[in-house]
Image: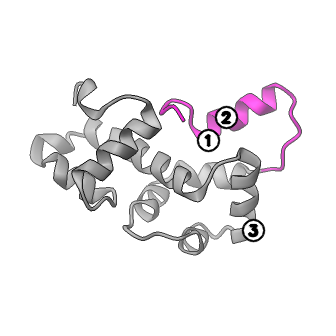
Amino acid sequence: FLIDDTPRAQYDRKIRLNIDLPDFEHILSFLETKTAAEVFCEKRVSLLEVSRASNISTSDWKNYLECENISFTTLKKTVRIKHVERLVQEGFLEQFTVDSLAAEIGYSSRSSFYSAYKEVTGEAWGSQRH
């Protein structure tokens, strides 16, 4: 996953390529909300909790994940890292540490956050202008 390649971008690209897809608009719309960021940033968030928060059935979520060929863990990391980018743009690091940032998005350590960031973006955290 590249950070700029959001689930919506992937979905829109498949639509442009005339790939027949189930309608996941409700999921994509939810993923762009602040509520999605909040629920995915909970330390031990589950698919059931996401389903409840989004008012989208777990079977719809499972179908979406299967169609996109991604795991729930991968989606969770992606949503969290997108939220990090927003927090950084809003000046979070001007007042708080990287450890606080990691905790804010649901990671118990800075190293867990660094690993997730690299996995999602393909770049090390320090390589950016954070």
Marks 2/1 in contact by CB < 8 Å: the verdict is: yes
Residue in the image at 50% along x and 29% along y: 4
The label on residue 59 is 3
Marks 3/2 in contact by CB < 8 Å: the verdict is: no
For the residue pair 128 and 36, the one nearer the viewer reads as: 128
- What's the residue type where badge 3 is placed? Ser
The residues bearing labels 3 and 2 have C-alpha atoms spaced at a distance of: 20 Å
Categorize mark 3 by other alpha carbons within 10 Å: few (<14), some (14-19), many (20+). few
- Image quadrant in which you'd find residue 34: bottom left
Q: Which numbered disc flags the more N-terminal residue, 1 or 3?
A: 1
- What's the residue type where badge 2 is placed? Gln
Q: Which numbered disc flags the more N-terminal residue, 3 or 2?
A: 2
For the residue pair 107 and 56, the one nearer the viewer reads as: 107
In the rendered structure, which segment of residues is drawn in magenta? 1-23
Instruction: Give x and y (percent) for residue 122.
Output: 43, 30
For the residue pair 61 and 54, the one nearer the viewer reads as: 61
Q: Quadrant of the N terminus?
A: top right
- Image side of residue 119 versus residue 20, left or right: left
The label on residue 73 is none
- Judged from the image, the secondary structure of the residue bearing numbered disc 1 is helix
Position above or below: 52 against 65 = below
Residue wearing tag 2 = 10
Q: Is residue 126 magenta?
A: no
The residues bearing labels 1 and 3 have C-alpha atoms spaced at a distance of: 18 Å
Residue wearing tag 1 = 7
For the residue pair 127 and 34, the one nearer the viewer reads as: 127
Instruction: Give x and y (percent) for residue 44.
Output: 42, 71
- What's the residue type where badge 1 is placed? Pro
Residue in the image at 50% along x and 53% along y: 33
Residue in the image at 63% along x and 33% along y: 9
Residue in the image at 12% along x and 40% along y: 94
